Amino acid sequence: MTPAATKGAITLERVTKRFGNLVAVNDVTLDIPGGEFFSLLGPSGCGKTTILRMIAGFEEPTAGRILLEGSDVSFVSPAKRNVNMVFQAYGLFPHMTVNDNVAFGLKIKHVSRTEVGGRVGEALRTVRMEELGGRRPAQLSGGQQQRVALARALVNRPAALLLDEPLGALDLKLRKEMQLELKRIHARTSTTFVYVTHDQEEALTMSQRIAVVKDGVVQQVATPRELYERPVNAFVAGFIGTSNLIVMRPDVRENGLAIMNLPDGDHICAPDTLAQGAEMKIMVRPERMRVWGEAEDERTSRVHGTIVEVVYLGSMTQLTIDLATGERVTIHELNDDLKGALPVIGEPVLVKWAADHSFVIDDGTTVNVALDESLPA
Amino acid sequence: MAAEAVLSARQRWQARAVRRLRPFGFLFGPVGVLLALFVAPLVLLLIMSFRYDSLYITKTGFTLANFAGIFTNPAYRTVARDTLMMATTAMLLQLAIAFPLAYFIAFKARRWELPVLLLLVLVDELNPIVRIYAWRMLLGRDGLINSALQWVGLTSRPVLWLLFSKFSVILVLSMSWVNYTTLPMYAAMKAINPIVFETATDLGAGWFTRWRRILLPLAAPGIFVAILLVYVPMFTDFATPALVGGPSSYMLGNQVADLMLEIGDWGTGAALSLLMLAATAVISVAAYFLSRLNQLD
């Protein structure tokens, strides 16, 4: 795999980072093309921040290489790399005004006075803080400080911008606004964005591609849609969105389907790709399971169940159902299919889903199935 | 009847004042002691400076002759200049040592932070006179340093200017009160969020820029408090020059002591004391306001 030497391209080649006996990052290889909005997603402590810090230069890899625009920068100091970082705690200089904070990187590069003024103004306009240039950080709200930190990084026109959970300290509404603003700013500049977060919704909202990380190992790198619809293992399936886990023991295998027969005419079908034996685990997304209206064919699973909980959420209804097979599943039904009254607790229902909407997983291994090949790559 | 019920404006004001001050009633004792033991002697000094007061000359009436004598006599000017030079040099030396020490304790010490702080405080607990005598043993003709130098072979005869000189006074002054210099700077540095150094590095700053643009401005209040606390004792000290100094390191403190105790010219001694008080007050106030510069808004 030749490292991309395009502007802003970042490559990690078999990067490992050890802190004493702890392996924080384990043999990670990533290829981020220039200009992409790329996210590192995972639970706390999974190593995503360590990966980011290695790209920035604050940590050195124990093994492997880090390439920026084709050149090896693994051991280059952060001051000399053409990347800038927006820290989780912002790190604004408390004794300088907003203008001076933003101008800091430029002054170090000995940019001329007039150009500094122009670029600082431009950066502040990009983050919509142009009125508050004279203020000190202590006089700004959290959201404003975050935007100044962003401007301070962007003004240097780095090849890549690294963001370490920058929206964590903001309230929900502000966070959602800033997510869209970051996306907008990314579209305007040609800078690569590498974004670290533990919030899957945030990653799905903003990113072009996401790397899901667990315990220092990259589980899957894909577009948001691919991660959601074709997760590679149980961890990714469970981390991105919600899904239901069902265990089945196939009785028959035919036409590419593994079928488990159940009493009352019920059966579960799943794509038969695991060449192994008695037990399979499948996962189905909540919106793919239906209780009211779905045509059946020979590739539809059906199981009887009882409603345990009903939550009306405006545009959809969330039902929790105990299946005859013993599992408890969550179903999202859109309310424009709703005819008449809402279902009630205790009501018996028939749950159906298409075999092609389930994916077979085995905890930890990389086996994936979803035969819906109409999805773009 | 009406006249008794209605209090005059003055009486109302008095009642209000008493009510406001009542919670502070417990302070009258300590304040009284303070007035007696601190302010009164100063007032006495003030009076003395305007009179010919000495063991031999007592004149009634007030005069400026004491002050005039100080300003016209070139000897006083020399002593003042020497004192200024030695105190300032000692202060700068101490800052040069205490600043890196404070930085080390604040940012690099990790689990040694508390032990080192304790050690710092303990070391200064030692009686200052005893400490100064220890310096004599180090610097003297037959002292530790000279013996070592001769034993190693660097000199054949003892180095005499190590003790009883300007050098020794500056050296000992710069090694005294290190606590009071290090701790305020340490406190100012602890208030810095260390992440600003990382962000500065990310933006391209090398160690010098980080030091000059980030550390120094943010630690400046600590530096000025250190000066505030230590410069005055250095400037007015007379024990150090008396014990490790010689004729070339005569300081203003010694001058006042001599005037009062040896020569018996209390008038001039008092006048000189007051002038020193005024000078150190100006320096202290300036240092205080400089230390609050960062809190302008």
Image: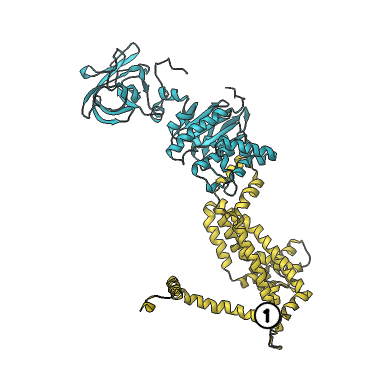
Q: Residue furthest front?
A: B2
Residue located at (26% from left, 27% from top): A321
Camera-side residue: B179 or B123?
Answer: B179
The residue nearer to you, when weighing A187 against B218, is A187
Q: Is residue B231 left or right of residue B19?
A: right
Q: How is the image coloured?
A: by chain
> As drawn, which residue projects farthest toward the top?
A255
State the image coordinates of residue A129 (x, y, percent, origin top left): 55, 39
Relative to A143, does residue B268 appear above or below in the rendering? below
Q: Is residue A16 above or below residue A336?
A: below
Expressed as whole percent of the image width and height from the top left, the position of residue B263 reads 72, 83
Q: Position of residue B145 (x, y in %)?
A: 70, 65
Q: Secondary structure at mark 1?
A: helix
Q: Is residue B154 visible?
A: yes
Residue B7 versus residue A280 in the image, above or below: below
Residue shown at 53% from the left, 42% from the top: A145
Residue A136: horizontal and vertical position, in percent? 56, 47
| Quadrant location of the N terminus of chain A in the rendered image | top right
Colour for chain A in the figure: cyan
Instruction: Count how many numbered circles sit on residues in the image.
Output: 1
Determine which quarter of the picture holds residue A343.
top left
Decide: few, some or many residues near mark 1? Use Cα within 10 Å; few <14, some 14-19, many ≥20: many
Quarter residue A242 falls in: top left
Q: Is residue A12 visible?
A: no
Q: At x 65% / y 67%, what residue is drawn?
A: B282
In terms of depth relative to the viewer, which is nearer, A276 or A175?
A: A175
Q: Quadrant of residue B128?
A: bottom right
Mark 1 chain: B
The three-letter code of the residue at mark 1 reads: Ser
Give the residue pinned by disc 1: B49
What is the display colour for chain B?
yellow
Q: B231 or A275: nearer the eye?
A: B231
